[in-house]
Amino acid sequence: MPLVLDRLNTALQQALRSDERVYLIGEDILDPYGGAFKVTRGLSSQFPDRVLTTPISEAAIVGVATGMALRGLRPIAEIMFGDFLTLAADQLVNHAAKFRWIYNDLVRVPLVVRTPMGGRRGYGPTHSQSLEKMFLGVPGLRLVAPNTLGDPAALLATAIAEDDPVLFIEHKLLYARPLLEIDQGDLIDFQVERDDRQYPVFTIRPRGQQKAALTLACYGYNFELARKAVLDLMYEKEIFSEIVLFSQLSPFEMKPLLDSVARTRRLLTVEEGSLTLGWGAELAARTAEAGIPELRVRRVAALDLPIANAKSLEDAILPSPQVITDAAVSLVSGSF
Amino acid sequence: MVDAFTLYKTMLLIRRFEERLIAEFSTGKLVGTTHVYIGQEADAAGIFSVTDSEDVVFSNHRCHGHFLAYGGDPYRLAAELMGKNTGLVGGRGGSQHIHWRNFYSNGIQGGILPVATGMALAEKNGHSGQVVLVFAGDGTLGEGLFYESLNIAALWKLPLLFVVENNHYAQTTPVELAVAGSIAGRFAGFAIPTWERDTTDVLEVRAVAQEALDHVRSGTGPGGLILHTYRFAAHSKGDDVRDPAEIARAREKDPLAMHGVRLKPVEREQAEAEVSARIEDAFTRADADPVPSLEPHATRP
């Protein structure tokens, strides 16, 4: 199966080929380097006029792309590490995300900002974070994250085709992962339901009559960890789980998750950002508001600490499959 | 070429509009705040007398003068400031956040500069022949994005005119406490040519703006237009801490008076009559307009 990296590269290539308004803009994205994570490799050679390398100016990259978008182009900006999004936060929050609404729907901002997030590569406190939670709930800004179940190329193509800004979060460890095949491998004992949203939600349920004891909610790379935990729970502990896998993080669309939690009454959220006020907190709050009887919730996330450089410390700070498994067992057994 | 009478009338429209605005705050018809342009009218009137109607403009928090000189409708602006449905952006943006045709403004210091830079790239690559003008003040020079934008605009030879209106105060902070070195030196560091005047004479502004725009329109890269001016009014509504004697000295170079002497008294009276009728009409109609409401889809679940 193709790798996530190849699918993202393919989506960019197809977008550049099919629409002359599409531009890539970012740091070190020209060949032969092709970007820090190689997502843009080969593209500047094929489209030299529309792949623009920039100075180290994250705020200006997003601002320039926003101006291009306001005037009819369809720019895709790359921020080399998601950690640097804080430098561009004003451009996202006070410019790109606001213009369409404050200008009373008279303009469109068809902008995609792609950025790699996440740790586990030993890059330390400023190159390993998952900062997407800082942008959740910003009016006018959609957050999307690919995974190995949906096609990352389709997801990115959808984002590029949108008339509004999209922040596209790519976990670094996903790049080298192959796409999953339904009914095979890890998924052989599961049925996969995909809803009809443009950024789909997948509900992954045990086959047969097994009633799931809990629902895991996750996105992006943490689906890899959640899946590992769910297989372990099933095969080692005979605890059956449903996974609700989101492609869109914000705005929050709750129906598939609420449907699942209505069946299991147990919700475990899994994310790699730090715990407090994270994605899982909003899911938990909205699920609680839905009035599901006997609901119990737990959140798994990174500790509320900067991410350390040493592997032993980083491993302790970021959630592992074991932490997910332990949280699931405690949630199901009711021991808190 | 725009004639002397029209230049005068544009400046007068800005002046009387802003005076009416300040007056309406005390009647309760306006809420929030505003940043008036009184004293700086020669800049906007001079610059927009030599722009092309399809050029793109990104203005800042002090945008009313730019908008009116651009050709914007004072009625739509008044309605916007009064929070009316008929406002430029339906009451969503207010004083600092407006859009009409190719005119845009936003309220974050420095934030508009890279956006304007991207707009200039779009104009260049679309071969429209249009240029982009972006307005900053002396206060904006403290923002890092100003320099990121100069750098990229110069590297990519974009058709972008950076207009710096130095009115000598960032809110209450005098330029001497906020700007080290020279303004022109900032542009020189990026090899961007500049045109600089310390004047409130609209004819001088027009001439220098024409030179700067000619350069930018030639396709060889961005330019900087540095205009030293002075605002007679407070930064926003009433927070003026400047020495009244200093303001009085500046008022001796009132751009309206300076240019007014070039007109006959009867022309000045005619301009006054036309402008006051237009402003009365604008505010009266805007006052009677309905207020906006959120669409059903925006209501809470």
Image (cartoon, rainbow, N blue to C red):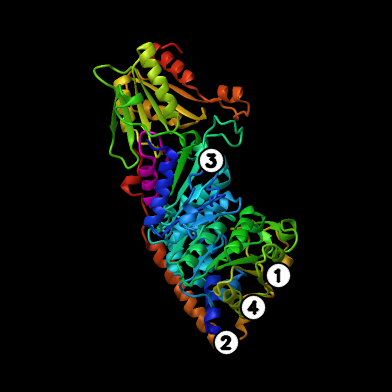
CA separation in Å, label 3 and label 2: 64 Å
For marks 1 and 4, give the one nearer the viewer.
Answer: 4
What residue do we see at 43% from left, 31% from top? A282
The residue closer to the viewer here, B70 or B219, is B219
Label whose residue precedes the other's in the sequence (2 or 1): 1
Residues marked 2 and 1, same chain: yes
Residue B64 versus residue B3 in the image, above or below: above
Chain letter of the residue beneath label 3 in the structure image:
A
For marks 3 and 4, give the one nearer the viewer.
Answer: 3
The residue labelled by disc 3 is A82
Please tell me whether mark 4 sits on a helix, a strand or a loop: loop
Label whose residue precedes the other's in the sequence (1 or 4): 4
What residue do we see at 50% from left, 31% from top? A277
The residue labelled by disc 2 is B265
CA separation in Å, label 2 and label 1: 24 Å
Magenta stretch: residue A170 in it? no
Residue A24: x %, y % from top left: 48, 53
In the rendered structure, which amino acid carries the disc numbered 2?
Answer: Pro
Label whose residue precedes the other's in the sequence (4 or 2): 4
The residue labelled by disc 4 is B201
Residues marked 1 and 4, same chain: yes
Residue B255: x %, y % from top left: 63, 76
Residues marked 1 and 3, same chain: no
Which image quarter: residue A17?
bottom left
Instruction: Please report contact status of discs 1 and 4: CB closer than 8 Å, yes or no.
Output: no
